[in-house]
Image (cartoon, rainbow, N blue to C red):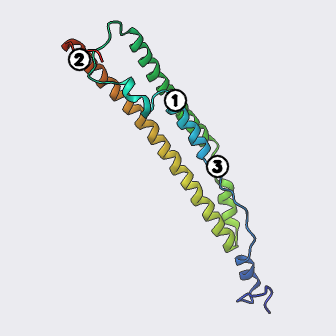
Amino acid sequence: MITVPGSVTQDLTVEHSVTMPSIGNNYQSNTQVIASMDGWLFGAVNVQDFSQMFPGWVKLPQDSTDYAAKLTSTILATYQSAFNVVQQQAQELDGENFSSNAARAAGEPAVLAELQDNTAALWQIANELQFLRQQMNTLLTIEIVEHDDQLNEKARMGATAAGSPIP
């Protein structure tokens, strides 16, 4: 006896497993969180003002105290922003607990529900990959700023010593 119209089986257990209603979409995008972290990270140094902050082989002005103070503040703000990103990421990790998903998946006989659980797990992996990419962006930003600051300092000192004209 077929219990569900259009069913290809007469087995109620099989029918139930492939016709289980949706458990709902539990995917939560992390784009807003990442955009917030990017805002912190690129608030002090960004591509638009990078060459102004680090001009390279340009003679230092007579009173370079203001320049040095501004540059130091900007670099420190970038480091603080990176620390904010790291702290936010750590707090994200604190809230992750997949034990309820694992328990539900282990006890679920329905094929459709299992497929939905697997899809939810794949979305979670995608979110984690986005967070990893954001962490890499943070690390690269710090590395770029740090190395450019070192090279910029040497170049400006060399240009000043060589008597290069002030732009």
> Would you say residue 90 is visible in this rendering?
no
Judging by the rendered image, the residue that carries numbered circle 1 is 43
First in residue order: circle 2 vs circle 1:
1
Q: Residue at x 43, y 28 (%)?
A: 49
Label 3 neighbour load within 10 Å: few <14, some 14-19, many 20+: few
Q: Residue at x 24, y 15 (%)?
A: 165
First in residue order: circle 3 vs circle 1:
1
Q: Position of residue 96 (x, y in %)?
A: 63, 46
- Residue sitting nearer the eye, 119 or 58: 58
Q: Residue furthest top?
A: 63
- Residue sitting nearer the eye, 86 or 76: 76
Judging by the rendered image, the residue that carries numbered circle 2 is 159
Label 2 neighbour load within 10 Å: few <14, some 14-19, many 20+: some
Q: Position of residue 102 (x, y in %)?
A: 65, 59
Q: Is residue 87 above or below residue 8?
A: above
In the structure shown, which secondary structural element does the residue marked by tag 2 occupy? Answer: helix
Question: What quarter of the picture does the N terminus occupy?
Answer: bottom right
Q: Amino acid at mark 3?
A: Asn
Would you identify the image quadrant in which residue 63 lies?
A: top left
* 76 left or right of 124 in image: left
For the residues carrying marks 2 and 3, which lies nearer the camera in this image? 2
* 153 left or right of 53 in image: left
